[in-house]
Amino acid sequence: MPPDRSTPLGGVVLAGGYSTRFGETDKAVADLAGTPLIRRVGDRLATVADDIVVNCRDDQLESIRGAFADSDIEPAYATDPVPDRGPLAGIRVGLEATAREYAAVVACDMPFVDPALVELLAERARGRDGAVVRLEDGWYQTTQAVYRADAMAAACADALESDEGRIVAALERLDVATVDERALEDEGISETTFESIDTQEALVDAERRLER
Ligand SMILES: Nc1nc2c(ncn2[C@@H]2O[C@H](COP(=O)(O)OP(=O)(O)OP(=O)(O)O)[C@@H](O)[C@H]2O)c(=O)[nH]1
Ligand SMILES: [Mg+2]
């Protein structure tokens, strides 16, 4: 069945973290084979999303805008009112800024995000509060997922107010469809979609594979 593109989809790229495992520099704008990580994510997401919001801190704005300088897409920016409150706070800020009922949320360090997965999740999310992949280890892949924006933003706010920083604390408050990681292979979606570049070693490794 061809994907239903009649429902607009927003895109949110999360970039407000401090990249501590990566080292001195911001992984969001790290160069991977000539293209900054965040631009790879934004460009891929833009093939299936109608507009893109980048969530980051104020002090990242200049460098992230620079990373998108010669991209065809021009993201909107939603910065954290209070930095360092964790990914849950970032998801909230990003989703509050999207104009769409549903939005795909993807971390800036996942340069191989598969647009086909985003479309699959958007389909599964319809009529629900979102759709997330359940990984083989039982964890939910919450930073490559589709959410009903107002419901998830409210659930994030609620979880944060209750001092529950875990993203699953927000999911527990919602009616979210789950997709088993094992089922993705049949859909032609490779696990590289979830690869995240957390360290310099991971960046070098990804670069080597791209050069092959
Ligand atoms: N807005 C916001 N986003 C965050 C925060 N912490 C992490 N994120 C984002 O959530 C996603 C997943 O987080 P991590 O992979 O742990 O990234 P990170 O926290 O920058 O890196 P580490 O410091 O090495 O853990 C990334 O896209 C981050 O940018 C935060 O405090 N605020
Ligand atoms: Mg972190």
Image (cartoon, rainbow, N blue to C red):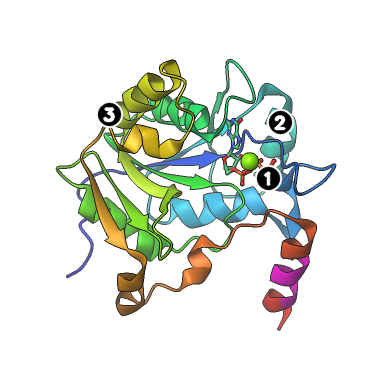
Q: Main secondary structure of the magenta part?
A: helix
Residue for point 62% across, 48% down: 38
Q: Which residue in the protein does label 2 denote?
A: 60
Residue for point 18% across, 47% down: 126
Whether the residue carrying mark 3 lies under 8 Å from ligand 1 is answered with no
How packed mark 1 is, by other alpha carbons closer than 10 Å (few <14, some 14-19, many 20 or more), is many
Classify 140 as above or below 187: above
Determine whether label 3 and label 1 are within 8 Å by CB: no
How packed mark 2 is, by other alpha carbons closer than 10 Å (few <14, some 14-19, many 20 or more), is some
Q: Earlier in the sequence, mark 3 or mark 2?
A: 2
Q: Earlier in the sequence, mark 2 or mark 1?
A: 1
Classify 73 as above or below 162: below
- Pick the quarter of the image with the C terminus: bottom right
Determine whether label 2 and label 1 are within 8 Å by CB: yes
Alpha-carbon distance for marks 2 and 1?
Answer: 9 Å
How packed mark 3 is, by other alpha carbons closer than 10 Å (few <14, some 14-19, many 20 or more), is many
Compared across the picture, whether 40 is left or right of 10 comes to right
- Pick the quarter of the image with the N terminus: bottom left
Which of the numbered marks, if any, corresponds to residue 28? 1
| 78, 22: nearer the viewer | 22
